[in-house]
Image (spheres, grey):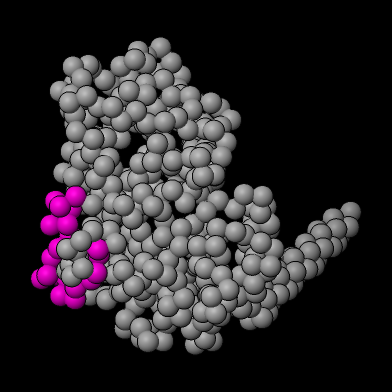
């Protein structure tokens, strides 16, 4: 029910929002469409108008709106043709929007203002280029990365040993029956599981992780479905957001989780004495990104370009990371200094893939900044394209038949009891009617 109301609100609010600003001075208005709780409102967003005036001498008013899923945002752009100036889609939606010509180029001619977009990690730039629909498209012209992370297993160390769950195959163990939360996000789950089920082909060099994730086929969907049908008897629930909270309460033992959510849960659990840890499966996982874009129907592309540049300033990247708990794609020296904390992270990691030369022994949070050996076995998640319907059908089959024998027996017992109650009530009503009829007959 909560998701239903969120969906209704997501459809209604944009209409109200657009109506309220229809008469606004669009030359001096910046309309931003972003994920909820995905920016430092106080220190970053609210300070943009003054920074913009310092750089350009022009006034700008920010109109800010949020969405809860990529698809609702895309509908507003593709179908409703809303004139948002800046949006923040995830990688597979960026890929889809590029294919459909729904993005405008970002003007990086900022005059005397430094081009902070150049501070984006080459690692992120390379991954973003994998979203290109063809070799003629330079993705960096259309989008600039914002946050990134991995997908892995969050687990309770008091209930699970790391050595027992390094592989996705380990999660099939019957001892984990009813102890796992799985993400209710078919692309994310598929991108992780496909690397496990084709692990032998990867080892033999017959296919790469990138190719496996990028090219969805019916055979690959079927292999992933087979794994999911095996593991679903260990799955306590399919979730998008509540899993991290349940982990802090010890309700389940493991949760397939996004790294940012995992870090939030680790910190929250520590406050109540629960030790949670996060790992990326041995076979590999996906690496995901969100990025800033200017959609096709934008009205204030100048302010939009400046805003994207503003979000890449190192001080703003740090403020946003501290506020929302995710990791910026900015790889400036200030970010490296902020991330390097030997007291909190005694084990060093090789982060040269992200920060460049000289970052091969950084004491950074491994949930935020995985070692290079981990990143090497992660692949970028992609749009499913023509296979989207097949993926959705597979996901529906897996989730729709998520009943164990015990659960089926329990449901049957409940249904039988309900039937018995109805029969008894019917008998009782008939008995009462008979008594009333006898009383009336006696009176006569």
Q: Is residue 60 left or right of residue 281?
A: left
Majority secondary structure of magenta residues:
loop
Residue 343 falls inside the magenta stretch: yes
The residue lying toward the viewer, choosing from 429 and 411, is 411
Query: Which residue is most to the left?
Result: 343
Query: Which residue is most to the front?
Result: 136
Residue 422 falls inside the magenta stretch: no
Q: Residue at x 28, y 47 (%)?
A: 120
Task: Give the percent coordinates (x, y) of residue 397.
Answer: 68, 64
The reply to whether residue 270 is visible in this rendering is no
Task: Give the percent coordinates (x, y) of residue 244.
Answer: 37, 64
Give above or below for 16 relative to 208: above
Task: Give the percent coordinates (x, y) of residue 165.
Answer: 42, 82
The residue lying toward the viewer, choosing from 435 and 70, is 70
Give above or below for 141 relative to 348: above
Give above or below for 389 relative to 298: below
The magenta stretch is: 332-352
| Residue 363 location, quadrant | bottom left
Point out the image quarter for the C terminus: bottom right
Q: Is residue 385 left or right of residue 340?
A: right
The reply to whether residue 149 is visible in this rendering is yes
Q: Residue at x 60, y 59 (%)?
A: 215
Q: Residue at x 66, y 61 (%)?
A: 217
């Amino acid at each position: 029910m909560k998701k239903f109301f969120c969906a209704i609100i997501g459809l209604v609010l944009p209409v109200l929002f657009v109506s309220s600003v229809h008469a606004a001075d669009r030359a001096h208005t910046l309309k931003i469409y972003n994920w909820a709780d995905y920016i430092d409102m106080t220190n970053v967003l609210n300070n943009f108008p003054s920074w913009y005036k310092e750089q350009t001498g022009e006034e700008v008013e920010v109109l800010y709106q949020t969405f809860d899923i990529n698809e609702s945002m895309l509908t507003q752009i593709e179908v409703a043709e809303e004139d948002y100036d800046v949006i923040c889609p995830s990688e597979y939606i960026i890929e889809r929007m590029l294919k459909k010509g729904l993005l405008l180029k970002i003007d990086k001619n900022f005059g005397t203002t430094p081009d902070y977009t150049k501070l984006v990690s080459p690692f992120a730039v390379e991954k973003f280029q994998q979203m290109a629909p063809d070799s003629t498209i330079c993705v960096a012209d259309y989008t600039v990365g914002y946050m990134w992370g991995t997908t892995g297993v969050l687990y309770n160390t008091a209930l699970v040993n790391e050595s027992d769950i390094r592989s996705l195959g380990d999660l099939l163990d019957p001892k984990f029956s009813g102890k796992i939360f799985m993400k209710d996000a078919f692309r994310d789950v598929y991108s992780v599981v496909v690397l496990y089920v084709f692990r032998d082909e990867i080892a033999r060099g017959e296919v790469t992780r990138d190719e496996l994730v990028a090219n969805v086929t019916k055979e690959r969907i079927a292999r992933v479905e087979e794994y999911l049908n095996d593991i679903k008897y260990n799955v306590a629930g399919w979730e998008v957001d509540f899993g991290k909270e349940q982990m802090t309460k010890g309700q389940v033992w493991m949760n397939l989780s996004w790294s940012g959510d995992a870090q939030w849960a680790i910190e929250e659990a520590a406050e109540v004495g629960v030790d949670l840890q996060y790992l990326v499966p041995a076979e590999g996982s996906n690496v995901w990104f969100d990025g800033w874009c200017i959609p096709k129907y934008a009205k204030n592309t100048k302010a939009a370009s400046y805003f994207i540049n503003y979000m890449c300033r190192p001080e703003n990247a740090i403020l946003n990371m501290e506020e929302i708990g995710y990791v910026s794609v900015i790889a400036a020296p200030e970010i490296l200094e902020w991330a390097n904390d030997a007291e909190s992270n005694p084990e060093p990691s090789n982060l040269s893939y992200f920060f460049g030369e000289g970052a091969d022994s950084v004491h950074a949070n491994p949930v935020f900044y995985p070692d290079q050996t981990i990143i090497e076995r992660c692949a970028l998640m992609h749009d499913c394209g023509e296979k989207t319907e097949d993926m959705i059908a597979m996901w529906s089959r897996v989730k729709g038949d998520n009943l164990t024998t015990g659960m089926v027996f329990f449901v049957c017992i409940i249904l039988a009891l309900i039937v018995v109650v109805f029969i008894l009530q019917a008998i009782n009503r008939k008995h009462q009617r008979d008594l009333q009829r006898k009383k009336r007959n006696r009176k006569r």
